[in-house]
Image (cartoon, helix red, strand yellow):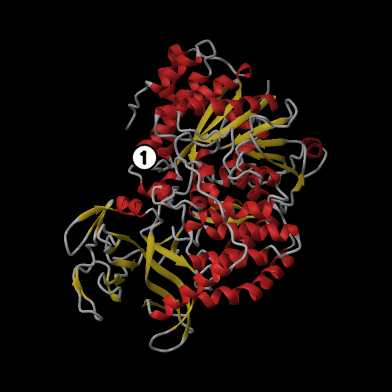
Amino acid sequence: MSKKAIEISFPVAELDRVAEIESYRKEIYRPIYHNHKWWAQRLGSVFRAIVIGSTGDEHISIFDQFYCKHGTNDKIVLDPFMGSGTTIGEALKLGSKAIGCDINPISSFIVKQSLNNVNAVKLYQEYLELERNVKPIISKYYTKVHPVTKELCSVLYYFWVMTVKTPEGKPLHLFSNYVFSKNAYPNKKPAAKIVCPNCLNVIDSQFNVESVKCSRCNHEFNPQSGNVSGAFVTDPQTGVKYKILDLIKETGTKPEYVLYACLVALPNGAKEYLPITDEDMELFNQASNDYSALKNKLPDFNIESGHNTNQVLNYNITKWTDFFNARQLLCLNVLLEQILKISDRDIREQFLVLFSGTLEFNNIFCSFKGEGTGAVRHLFSNHILKPERLALENSIWGTENSSGTFSTLFHRRLLKTQEYLQKPFELKIVDGKSEKVFCNNALKPVFVRDFDKLKNTDNACLILNGDSSKLDLPDKCVDAVVTDPPYFDFIHYSELSDFFYSWLKPVVEQDYPFFNLPSSRREGEVQNTDPTDFAENLSRVFREACRVLKDEGLLIFSFHHSKSSGWSCILEALRKSGFGIVKAYPIKAEMSVSTPKTQAKSPINLDALLVCKKINEIDHTSKNDYTQKVKELYEGHIKGFNGNGRNLSLNDKFVIYFSQLITVLSQDNATPVETLVNIVNNTQFNFKD
């Protein structure tokens, strides 16, 4: 029986160079997958190669075909864990037909909009209409008179500090230190802004200074030493230490914040940090009153208990509106109301995705990254729901100098997405530098409602929502299944996506029935912290993939994990669903500079691409000689990375080793699955060098 190209080889070294560059600016090089937040966004260049290799026969060279135009309209590619839509977009770019399904309604909604090639002229006209009608309303709540020059300034950001009260009612501001703004490279640019703990005055100084005297109240202090250490705050007058969470829980209400500074844009374009005045407080109070007067307010959803949501419920944050202050809620409601007046449904939904994406950067869970970089550290930068002690209030509509506002995201996300749909490109490394290669036709998918229409329509795309273990598809109808399944103990997508769902549900459920439930959580989610349950839930989806996949077809997915239990779950799920692994390729994974990676002692920068076939279609092996086979495969990949000048972390090596281990074991269909799983769980990783 003939094989597919990816069963023979995969261009790991060539792709590694391309993927590395893409990983640093994914929103620029693959904007169609970054129009909106999703929590696991794999690299388009890698998945392009996977689709080529899974649909092309063994005689082709995958990388030779990488920069060619393709017209494989007879091929159908399925992704049962669609997420941000990487597989769908890459399959469509290559001319294949695509089926995407996800159990999360946010995924199904944003993927369709991000791939929808709309009239760019109409899109921009509606943006200008929003600008005329909404910008003046929002901007008046983010404007102040300069205290010295008396010029009218645009407020880019307001700075807030979480405040708790002692049992005696004394307020304590939660500052771990008093340097609230510094450059991303402080040793090169040491200038910094410091807040006085006594009067909240803004002081110009340097990031590493250890003694400052406030020019307003003459208070002397060490800016490097705040009153907060870890989970505790100390009263500077009495020296009594309190656990912060205990003080908040005792109030029975959500944390309070105090406004202490703002960053303004002067008429000449310069920026300046200013302390808060009575005028600022009056403006905020006016916004609060105006919000209270609104008749129809969104959202109005309680936060359900869960692994991630308990992180905020512990802080008495019980509603999704608690993620915003009154001024933010007012301005967001004004903006949303105007978007809903757009008559063209396709255009309206484009702006709804943009609005939803704007929420990520405009809430009191945001913080300040500093000068010399994107200013706003968004809500999900750590993949958790973490209340910010030093919150940053963005200006929602924004200015040319803003980051993460509706207007800037329109130009940097929405327009870039539409430009890419019109003229998709790939990255190519030439003489050590990257350049764009336009080797795809315009991406204009035809969205269909069922498989029959997909089969009989060119450039067809079927976007589904629901449990991927119960697909409404015929047997053996799909040429390849390419996906990126969730991890059993990491991010709980539905709990986090409820942040967006609470705003979108009331305004789209009439057109999208899969928004009809109170939250985005669904029965049948694969996400589960228990390894046994995760393996069983994943096997249900893989079993369905086996049913709809042609006999000669491949299931290919990316995976990494730093524990043997993660790999044993994958092995168990595959074998119980009728698959074995024929190849496992280590390849570049997520963005190297993502927050979870930069904070990890041994970050995982590699995914394993697991190439799977139906078990009765592969040659079987015995577990008796698996140790030597695994070692040979592992050392071969390590040698390849060393030759490519790639530094691997210990966890990268762990990924390589365990991916080869489950590959060899998966091909042994004579040994009970339970025995194979025990081998994985009891394997010690001893190949560190």
Residue that sits furthest to the bottom in the current view: 149
Tell which of 47 and 167 is nearer to you.
Answer: 167
Residue that sits furthest to the front in the current view: 168
Tell which of 523 and 458 is nearer to you.
Answer: 523
Asked whether residue 310 is in view, the answer is yes
Residue that sits furthest to the left in the current view: 238
Q: Residue at x 16, y 61 (%)?
A: 238
Q: Residue at x 62, y 53 (%)?
A: 504
Where does residue 86 sit, x and y in percent of width and height?
61, 45
Where does residue 508 sit, x and y in percent of width and height?
68, 53
Left or right of 233 on screen, residue 107: right
Left or right of 311 on screen, residue 229: left
Where does residue 680 sit, x and y in percent of width and height?
42, 22
Tell which of 595 and 136 is nearer to you.
Answer: 136
Q: Residue at x 56, y 32 (%)?
A: 9
Left or right of 258 on screen, residue 510: right
Vertical placement of 58 versus 389: above or below?
Answer: above
Left or right of 343 on screen, residue 141: left
Query: The N terminus appears in which quarter of the rendering?
Result: top right
Vertical placement of 31 versus 411: above or below?
Answer: above
Where does residue 120 sit, x and y in percent of width and height?
72, 64
**Which quarter of the figure has residue 273?**
bottom left
Label 1: state its secondary structure: loop
Q: Residue at x 59, y 41 (%)?
A: 47
Query: The C terminus appears in which quarter of the rendering?
Result: top left
**Which quarter of the figure has residue 639?**
top left
Asked whether residue 424 is in view, the answer is no
State the residue position of label 1.
649
Amino acid type of the residue that numbered disc 1 sits on in the rendered structure = Ser
* Circle 1 crowding by C-alpha within 10 Å: few under 14, some 14–19, many from 20: some
